Amino acid sequence: MHHSVVNQAGLAQSVHSVPHSRIRELAEIAFRMDGVLRLYFGESNQPTPDFIKQAAIKAMDSGYTFYTENAGLLSLREEIAAHYQRLQGVALDPRREIVVTASGVQGLNVAIRCVLDPGDEALVLTPSWPNGASIVAMSSAKAIEIAQPLRGDRYEIDWDALEASVTPRTRLLIYTSPSNPLGWTATELDQDRLLDFSRRHGLWLLADEVYDRLWYETETLGTPVPSILRKATRDDAVMVVHSFSKSYCMTGWRLGYVIARADLAAKATQLNEFIVSHAPSFTQRAGETALREGEAEITAMLHRLKANRDFCIEALAEMPRLTVPRPEGAFYLFPRVENLTDSFEFCRKLLIDTKVGIAPGVAFGLGGEGSIRICYAADKAILEPAMERLHTFLKRS
Ligand SMILES: Cc1ncc(COP(=O)(O)O)c(C=O)c1O
């Protein structure tokens, strides 16, 4: 039969409200170019350590090619609990408080879905990696961005703005420590106040701690940033998102986990079935090996990252127009550029003219415009020419 009626089916309102990632937008331009010095994504050019790859191969050979539990293999959850006890001194129940996810971002996704109804509001400390706020929008809820002010060379939390932003629909507060893109790390006092704030207002507190191993303000590199879980009780409405991506150079593997109050962990486990069911089986086995045997690699990586950080801070200090806050963790610098009002255009032009790819501050929400994000996880052989070209570009602009 011939149909002359055009089907007008459109997309859901809730998906229209999800903004594009402006980091991706920049990357899309860069992908079409040759020879770009890529500093826009949060990853290094170091491959996954060989012993982790071997563990995945061995897992495939020994039959880890089938479905696993929705919460992930119990052996991995036990390894996570042991690792957490060792590093953070926090006792976790692997059967009730840990859910393995197919990446940190999937952990954020399932955790946020568990606590937001359509029309609810989530407070998000920004500038931050945009995915948290976008997942809130995908849940038909509203992200209320609270910018972290820069005082001196350190970012802080705007407690007055937080208090003033709470409404009867507020359900959740999301923060990232160490922060992407700021490198800021919550102090103990910040953690006390964040917990107090969320308890007083009956909110869930979501701590994105995927960069907890990348911390430089410690006597011994390798010591993680103290987790909010040291202060919270297991009955607190707290969830912590983790990832294997950054600590073990496993970005492409997609493996992470959520630690949460038992009722949330149970619901997230159930919902996982309908999202990805579970993280890939052999990847989970490789994750166990990473946790068990990865410490030496992490320490070596941290020495490299700290040297990169210090090299870039020194190089940026020589350049005109820049203010460079000192980051305590993660692997980003977030310099503010004097008189910059369109960071996307700045980064696009830098990319086209010099083949240096960095991320525009505007991608990170309120408070981000006017800054640029440089990921210093790449090799010196990439960072050195990138810094030189940025310097020349700034002198010209
Ligand atoms: C703050 C933050 N959280 C979570 C993630 C998620 O990492 P993945 O999904 O690779 O585990 C990232 C990655 O860039 C991040 O920067």
Image (tube, helix red, strand yellow):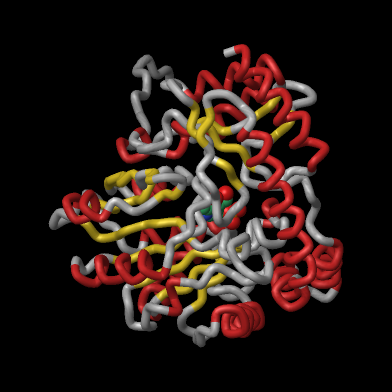
Q: State the image coordinates of residue 175 (x, y, percent, origin top left).
A: 40, 57
Residue 388 in the image: above or below residue 364: above
Q: Quadrant of the C terminus?
A: top right
Residue 208 in the image: above or below residue 373: below
Q: Is 93 on the left or on the right of 86, as rendered?
A: left
Quadrant in the picture for residue 31: top right
Q: Is residue 74 visible?
A: no
Q: State the image coordinates of residue 162 (x, y, percent, origin top left).
A: 24, 53
**Residue drawn 76% across the image and 74% down it:** 289
**Residue drawn 36% across the image and 50% down it:** 125
Q: State the image coordinates of residue 78 (x, y, percent, origin top left).
A: 61, 84
Q: Is residue 252 visible?
A: yes
Quadrant in the picture for residue 45: top right
Q: State the image coordinates of residue 93 (x, y, percent, origin top left).
A: 50, 86
**Residue drawn 78% across the image and 57% down it:** 48
Q: Is 13 on the left or on the right of 256, as rendered?
A: left
**Residue drawn 70% across the image and 22% down it:** 32
